[in-house]
Image (cartoon, rainbow, N blue to C red):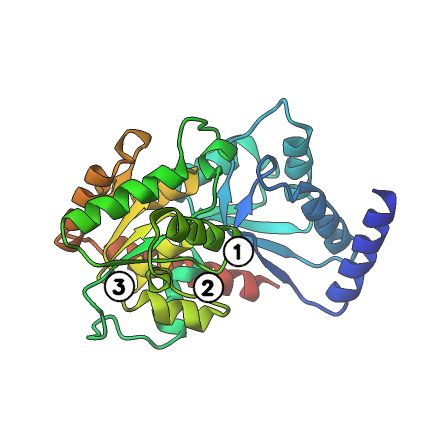
Amino acid sequence: MVAYRVRLTRFFTNEFSGLDGIVTAVGALKFSTQDFSFIFKILTEVATSLDIPVFFSAASIEKPNNGDWRYHQLVEALNMPCVKIITTRDGIDGVSRLSSGYVLNPDIVIDYVGDPALLIPDVYKIPLHFDNRDNLVGIGLVRRNIYKDYGTDSIDEEMIYISLIRELDKRGIDWVMFCNGMKADYAMGKHILSKLNLPSDKLLPRPLSAESYIDMIQHFDVIFCARFHACLTAYALGIPIVGLLWDDKLRFFAKIMGVEALFCEASQLDGVSISDKIIEAIDYDYDKSNLELYKHKTIDSIRMFCKSI
């Protein structure tokens, strides 16, 4: 551990040399399922020693746990003198978690913003009204044991997919499986192909770039989203979504965007219930006002930080 700390400190010192500020696209401030508390601690220590301001941007916020030493290490990292702004993609709920359980320094600015992925159409110049959809349901894949790893032991991810596929076939609805590029998710798709003796074209190739992933997403009429960024990408592109609720970030996203009715609780993970939501999603009355609000808040927070340094 000592050698790792020395190497990481040296790495950050070299990388940060000459910078005026650091914007860290965190993704998540977590310490249990994904523990980066040690890395964040060294990052903020180095930035403080170099007198470089740090902005932690658009993070999901894990519930505080005073009984976990990693939580306390993360709190210490976030309250180093270099930290000036922390924003969350969890809306008002995320701000509440930050202010009550993480941020002790009153000078640190806290706010909610949108995930940067909501800006995909703007960044990639993609029109939101396009005619290249294929009357197709995209079934987003997630790895085995995702529910167990996030605190729910009784869910069998394999059976979710098998039940959904059988029900879609029964209703005559065309579908195809896809993943966001993660090998473990793609392995689930390969397993389902083998289990149900399906043709290989029912699983799309694993995308190896953001461009190929976005191009793939654009062809679906509606998407069953297991991964958070599948939800974000599809919603940003104006594609109807149905989602799973295996982590707080998905629940907060559904709440923020007003699509909670289209996300599946643990009691709704059967093919019939999910298929019903897929049909509902196509004609759902989406309110995109929050999408625009959160996109602008993301940009404005970065501009504010850049002006302050």
- Badge 2 element: loop
Q: Residue at x 16, y 43 (%)?
A: 276
Q: Quickly name the residue at label 1.
A: 183
Q: Residues within 10 Å of mark 3 (few under 14, many from 20)?
A: many
- Badge 3 element: loop
Q: Name the foreground residue: 185 vs 158.
A: 158
For this view, does 115 lie left or right of residue 241?
right
Marks 2 and 1, the one that precedes in the sequence: 1
Q: Kindly identify the amino acid type of the residue bearing the numbered disc 2.
A: Arg
**Residue 136 image-quadrant placement:** bottom left
Q: Which residue is drawn at 35% across and 77% down?
A: 125
- Is there CB contact under 8 Å for labels 2 and 1? yes
In the rendered structure, find residue 58 and report the number of the disc placed on it: none
Q: Kindly identify the amino acid type of the residue bearing the numbered disc 3.
A: Phe
Q: Quickly name the residue at label 2.
A: 206
Marks 3 and 2, the one that precedes in the sequence: 2
Q: Quickly name the residue at label 3.
A: 220
